[in-house]
Image (cartoon, grey):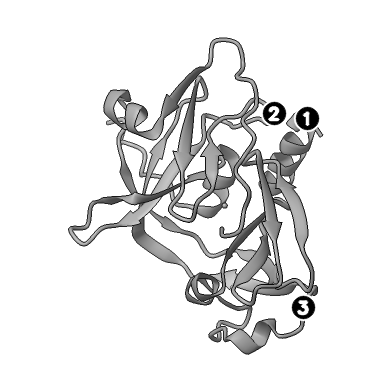
């Protein structure tokens, strides 16, 4: 029921999770919204990084036989995926699509029976296969971006993403997410954006403080 309500909310609010993606086309900001670079936000924001982990959930993935273009409404990003042998097109829990490197997909997901993925599983192109995300507790850091702020993030794989674009409802705000560095802190060399409503479905939230 919760997932269905979130899906409907996203559909109502739309105006209409990566390699080989074309840079996003930034939308006009909403009234009162402030634009910041990632560096500016990290310096000025009172929000803090918190430890999080991926939940176990299902996605779909495939490799393509010809150039495929699509728009990710949650990110406001246009992607182009080609038959290059290394790029996988993925579809998430809310129907959003993105691209990722095959080697990363094999590390991040399993088959639905829990067995490991191999390159051979993607040999048949243009047909989605069902995958299961590996549960990874306490292996990422996240930082919420309030809805009144739009942060521009240049990802490690070359895409340009923006938080809180006005074309969709973002709940309490999108999240910046990154892996741990070698010192168990946030790895700021590889930061990406997760839609606010999608984050609550796919990542762990910090424990609420005890009111007592």
Give the secondary structure at mark 1.
Answer: loop
Foreground label between 3 and 2: 3
Residue 83 drawn above or below residue 34: below
What residue appears at the point 80 percent right and 74 percent down from the top-left corner? 127
Q: Which callout, 3 or 2, points at the residue further toward the start of the chain?
A: 3
What residue appears at the point 53 percent right and 33 percent down from the top-left corner? 163
Q: Quadrant of the C terminus?
A: top left
Image coords of residue 16 (percent x, y): 82, 34
Give the secondary structure at mark 2.
Answer: loop
Q: Which callout, 2 or 1, points at the residue further toward the start of the chain?
A: 1
Image coords of residue 115 (percent x, y): 55, 86
Quadrant housing residue 111: bottom right
Q: Nearer the viewer, residue 7 or 61?
A: 61
Image coords of residue 60 (percent x, y): 69, 67
Look at the numbered discs 2 and 1 and tell me whether their residues touch, using CB distance below 8 Å. Answer: yes
The residues tagged by marks 3 and 1 sit, at their Cα atoms, a distance apart of: 31 Å
Which residue is the site of mark 2? 167
Q: Nearer the viewer, residue 20 or 144?
A: 20
* Image mark for residue 15: 1
Which residue is the site of mark 3? 125
């Amino acid at each position: 029921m919760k997932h269905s309500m979130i899906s409907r909310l996203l559909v109502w609010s739309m105006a209409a999770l990566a390699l080989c993606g074309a840079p996003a086309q930034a939308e006009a900001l909403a009234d009162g919204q402030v634009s910041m670079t990632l560096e500016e936000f990290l310096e000025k924001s009172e929000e803090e990084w918190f430890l999080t982990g991926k939940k176990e959930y299902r996605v779909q993935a495939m490799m393509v036989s010809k150039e495929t273009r699509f728009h990710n409404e949650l990110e406001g990003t246009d992607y182009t995926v080609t038959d290059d042998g290394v790029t996988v097109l993925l579809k998430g829990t809310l129907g959003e699509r993105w691209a990722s490197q095959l080697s990363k997909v094999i590390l991040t997901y399993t088959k639905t029976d829990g067995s490991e993925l191999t390159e051979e599983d993607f040999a048949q192109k243009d047909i989605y296969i069902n995958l299961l995300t590996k549960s990874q507790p306490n292996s990422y850091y996240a930082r919420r971006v309030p809805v009144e702020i739009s942060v521009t993030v240049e990802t490690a794989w070359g895409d340009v993403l923006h938080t809180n674009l006005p074309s969709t409802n973002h709940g309490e705000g999108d999240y910046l997410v990154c892996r741990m560095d070698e010192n168990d802190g946030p790895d700021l060399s590889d930061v990406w954006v997760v839609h606010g409503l999608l984050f609550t479905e796919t990542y762990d939230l910090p424990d609420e403080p005890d009111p007592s």
